[in-house]
Image (tube, rainbow, N blue to C red):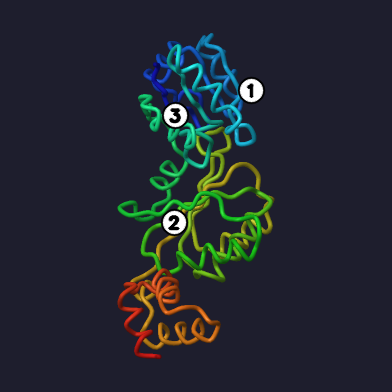
Amino acid sequence: MGTLYLVGTPIGNLEDTSLRALRILKSVSLIAAEDTRRARILARKYEIDTPITSYFEGNKLAKLDTVLDALAGGDVAVISEAGMPGLSDPGYELAQTAIERGVPVVPIPGPSAPVTALVASGLPTDRFLYLGFLSRRAKERRDQLAEVTHEPYTLILFEVPHRLVDSLADIEDVIGDRPIAVCRELTKLHEEVWRGSVSDARDHFATIEPRGEFTLVVGGASEEEARWDEARVRAALDDLSAEGVSPSAAARRVASLSGWRRREVYRLGLEET
């Protein structure tokens, strides 16, 4: 039985490839790649002649057996289009299945857009919350933002160019006009880190067409924003009770939004009944 390697690859600049990653990619029997075109560019640059097979969102479940069969006879490396596989990219299901079957799973650290953006943002790095891609649907996107409104952690998320301005507007409306770093094309030729407030970012990118891949880093809730006062908690419980939501479910929902502990919210809810 071989080893499954989760190999981090460059998010832009090919010089960010590690020596260990190159050694592994050259020594395994198969490379499972999210984007075979990008994989072959990397392979050509570093003279890697290992066979490459596609492993992307649309075929990741169908390809499980192919990769597992390959592991029966040798080592396999999984790479994403850019960055670390399994982090907003295919790889999680394969790693989980391999672990369940007793296959060794070894990470080969490499570049990561969320961490790269975070350290360049100028915002606090001691505690952060990675959200991945927000929903393409406005209501669901706003609901996702509402869930983290009162979190004190720096927020990191991805966005595509054609939704950037709408998402910035939703961020400002739902969680407030906080400091933000809008990171574009990280490590690439046209890398840009725009820093300022969410409202200024919205105005900026409303006049300049967004292009490239975006990672947003947003300041966390202030101490005042992080916790609702008691009156607001009681009002939210009253609203949910009127909708027929059970006390337990209401406490769980309000606790996730308010910065209160669930048992504290539940106790207030009992007092309301």
* Disc 3/disc 2 C-alpha distance (Å): 22 Å
Q: Position of residue 26 (x, y in %)?
A: 45, 11
Quadrant of the snapshot with the N terminus:
top left
Which element type, helix, strand or loop, lies under badge 3?
Answer: loop
* Disc 1/disc 2 C-alpha distance (Å): 32 Å
- Mark sitting on residue 155: 2
Q: Position of residue 45 (x, y in %)?
A: 54, 14
Which element type, helix, strand or loop, lies under badge 2?
Answer: strand
Residue type indicated by callout 1: Arg
Earlier in the chain: of badge 1 and badge 2, it is 1
**In the visual, does 269 lie left or right of 37?**
left
Look at mark 1 in the image and give the residue it sits on. Answer: 37
Quadrant of the snapshot with the C terminus:
bottom left
**In the visual, does 253 lie left or right of 52?**
left
Look at mark 3 in the image and give the residue it sits on. Answer: 8
Earlier in the chain: of badge 3 and badge 1, it is 3
Which element type, helix, strand or loop, lies under badge 1?
Answer: helix
Seen from the viewer's position, the closer of residues 207 and 164 is: 164
Earlier in the chain: of badge 3 and badge 2, it is 3
